[in-house]
Amino acid sequence: MPGMKSNSRLSVLVAVVAVAATAAACSNADAGSKSTGGSDASGAFEVSTSSCPPEATQALGDGEPLKVGTVWPLSGPYAALGEPIVAGMKTALASVNADGGIDGHQVELEAEDDGYDPSKTLPVVTKMIQQDKVFATVAQAGTPNVAAVQPLYEQSCTPQLFVGTGAPQYGDPANHPWTISGAMAYNTEADAWADYLKQEKPGAKVAYLAIDTDGGKAYSDGFEAAAKEDGLTVVASEKVAPDAATVENQVTNLLAAKPDVIILMSVGASCAKAMGAMAAGGFKGTTIAAYTCAAAAIFPVLGQAAQGALAVAVNKNVTDASDADIQKFRDDIAKYGEGTEPSDDALSGYRYAMVFVEAAKAAAELDGGLTRANLMDAAWNLDSQWFASVGGAARTDGTKDAYALETGQMVSWDAAKKELVPVGEPIDREGKTAAFSG
């Protein structure tokens, strides 16, 4: 069937986390629901629906709109990241709707703002699930934000698809089958940094600044382990709160260690402030930034301060007009984007929406049609294209391969051209991240 794998898979047992308050409501689930999680007759991973409400296994009615949600910072210091991503998602879905939608359904996107504040994520997601009855959400941002609302998805059996965080715990179908990551796992990205430095700067002294979240910890833990294997020395490390007003003290401490390389395992404003402080402090070494930090919305503002900074990109080069995916993206932005610039962040949003479309099309072909459970099953058994990604494919295999995005490209910021320029060959980790093991 299109978009899904049918080869033999590792059998697993899946227990959907449910709280006592919802047990009674869930007990009258559809009689045809899957009583246990694990593998079907073909070996494909399946979510358990034994504790789900009936809606989880009910197909969307003929012609009924497919309502999906997303949550990003659309105000505050991280809005520069969230706004173009949401605009890119809207653009992609407008194009899909113009071509007939998904299995006869027009897609309606509800975008909510949480300002990257987990305390604000809970009420907006509660509204989307309980009042607005979204079928799924796509590309929700922020490691702590996703964690804050994950129980809501598990209790209601609502797919939390392709979340916009590479925190490795969102590749855990055995224990949290209703949430799947849409980013390269942070530990995989960190491993790629270390491998690059091993080749280009063997024995380098490295300092890093990590955002103080589970995502930042995944970056730092992953890099520390890889650095040890690759003969690199970590000479200093600092943390920064997501809402920190300044980072000058942390950067001063990093510079005092006289590193050859500084890695910014951060996002948004804190990343930009750190890079500015590094330039002001006279740092002349190598800068590596997390991909969320290397957003094209941030680097142009920094100008020469970001020149030569490296990152592992997962998007194709948004300026490459010779690429068919990029040309379609740029055409659609011009037609449906309502003034949105064809930026790398807008491309990320477009790409998130398109992998959701692939999963939804695959789900519609399963027995029972387009249900929430089938949509989640399709996401865990993908074998499809991933529009405008470096690797070009989205592949998952349940607990054997829980991360859909595992190929990237080292890039360097060219301040004169205002673009990320490829460095070397693509970094292919396909199938190597396995699943989260705690």
Image (cartoon, rainbow, N blue to C red):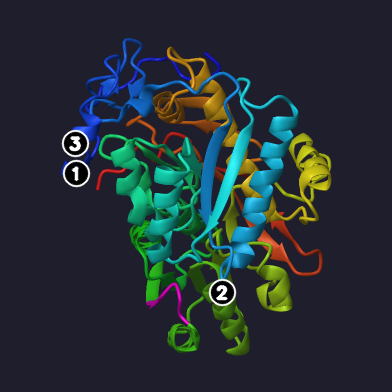
Residue 390 in the image, given as x and y percentages of width and height: 63, 41
The mark closer to the camera, 3 or 2, is 3
Q: How many angstroms separate mark 2 from mark 1 (CA)?
A: 40 Å
| Residue at 80% in and 45% down | 330
Residue type at mark 1 is Ala
Is residue 368 inside the magenta stretch? no
Circle 3 residues within 10 Å: few <14, some 14–19, many ≥20: some
Question: Percent x, y for residue 190?
Answer: 45, 57
Q: In the rendered image of this protein, does residue 109 appear above or below residue 30?
A: below
| Residue at the spot 41% in from the left edge and 15% down from the top edge | 7
Q: Are marks 3 and 1 in contact (CB under 8 Å)?
A: yes
- Residue furthest to the front: 131
Q: Which mark is residue 369?
A: none
Q: Name the residue tied to disc 3.
A: 23
Residue under label 1: 21
Residue 93 lies, with reference to residue 167, above or below; the image says above
Reply above or below: 245 against 174. below
**What is the magenta range?**
236-244
Callout 2: SS? helix
- CA separation, marks 3 and 2? 42 Å
The reply, left or right, for residue 436 in relation to residue 429 is left
Residue labelled with disc 2 = 269
- What is the spatial separation of the Cα atoms under label 3 and label 1, in whole angstroms? 6 Å
In this rendering, the answer to whether 53 lies above or below 117 is: above
The amino acid type of the residue labelled 3 equals Ala
Of the pair 188 and 145, the residue shown nearer to us = 145
Label 3 sits on a secondary structure element that is: helix
Q: Residue at x 68, y 62 (%)?
A: 296
Q: Amino acid at mark 2?
A: Ala
Asked whether, in this view, residue 435 is left or right of residue 67, the answer is left
* Secondary element at image label 1: helix
